[in-house]
Image (spheres, grey):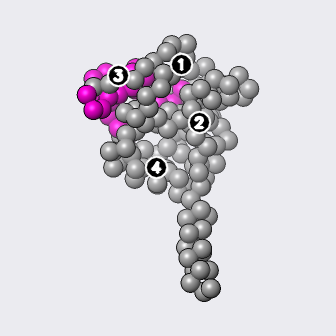
């Protein structure tokens, strides 16, 4: 019984230590923007990107950042090489572009300034009307992202 209690405790501890950002999808976004327009954060990443994994873990550890994003923004985590469904975004439809055993989503290329191969992680922040307000390549540390988001909200 004692070992079961310890096991359950160890399983539940991570749930209390990490906050979770309320991520959505592009199809959710259209409905959400009609009901309650907010700026949009799109985080482009891939499964093989170790920096992306570290970044996600570190961002979710910062409770203030998670609350800031959940209250004032819509966030979409976009896995650019595994997302294969068509995506309608800002009035245009984008498709997955297969390339042998892999591929990339056309929307990732449209959002990236490097049209042949995006840099990961890539952060795109749009205002509630879909206009670009921030483009950030590479690692975004929690303090830097928090500072940038607060700055955007105060404009």
Q: Position of residue 98 (x, y in %)?
A: 32, 24
Residue pointed to by mark 2: 24
Residue pointed to by mark 1: 88
Q: Earlier in the sequence, mark 1 or mark 2?
A: 2
**Residue closer to the observer: 110 or 72:** 110
Foreground disc of the pair 4, 1? 1
Whether tag 1 and tag 3 are in contact, CB under 8 A, the answer is no
Q: Earlier in the sequence, mark 2 or mark 4?
A: 2
Q: Position of residue 11 (x, y in %)?
A: 56, 69
Q: Secondary structure at mark 1?
A: strand
Residue pointed to by mark 3: 97
Q: CA distance from mark 3 to mark 2?
A: 22 Å
Q: CA distance from mark 4 to mark 3?
A: 26 Å
Q: Earlier in the sequence, mark 4 or mark 1?
A: 4
Q: Which residues are magenta?
A: 100-126
Q: Secondary structure at mark 2?
A: loop
Q: Secondary structure at mark 3?
A: strand
Label disc, if present, on residue 56 of the rendered structure = 4
Whether tag 4 and tag 1 are in contact, CB under 8 A, the answer is no
Which quadrant holds residue 35? top right
């Amino acid at each position: 019984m004692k070992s079961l209690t310890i096991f359950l405790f160890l399983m539940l501890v991570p749930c209390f230590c990490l906050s979770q950002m309320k991520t959505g999808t592009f199809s959710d976004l259209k409905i959400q923007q009609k009901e309650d327009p907010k700026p949009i954060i799109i985080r482009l990443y891939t499964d093989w990107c170790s920096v992306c994994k570290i970044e996600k873990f570190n961002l979710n550890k910062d409770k203030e950042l998670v609350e800031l994003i959940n209250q004032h923004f819509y966030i979409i985590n976009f896995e650019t090489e595994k997302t294969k469904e068509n995506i309608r975004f800002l009035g245009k439809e984008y498709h997955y572009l297969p390339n042998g055993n892999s591929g990339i989503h056309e929307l990732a290329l449209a959002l990236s300034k490097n049209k042949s191969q995006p840099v990961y992680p890539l952060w795109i922040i749009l205002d509630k009307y879909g206009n670009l307000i921030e483009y950030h390549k590479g690692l975004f540390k929690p303090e830097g992202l928090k500072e940038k988001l607060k700055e955007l909200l105060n404009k």
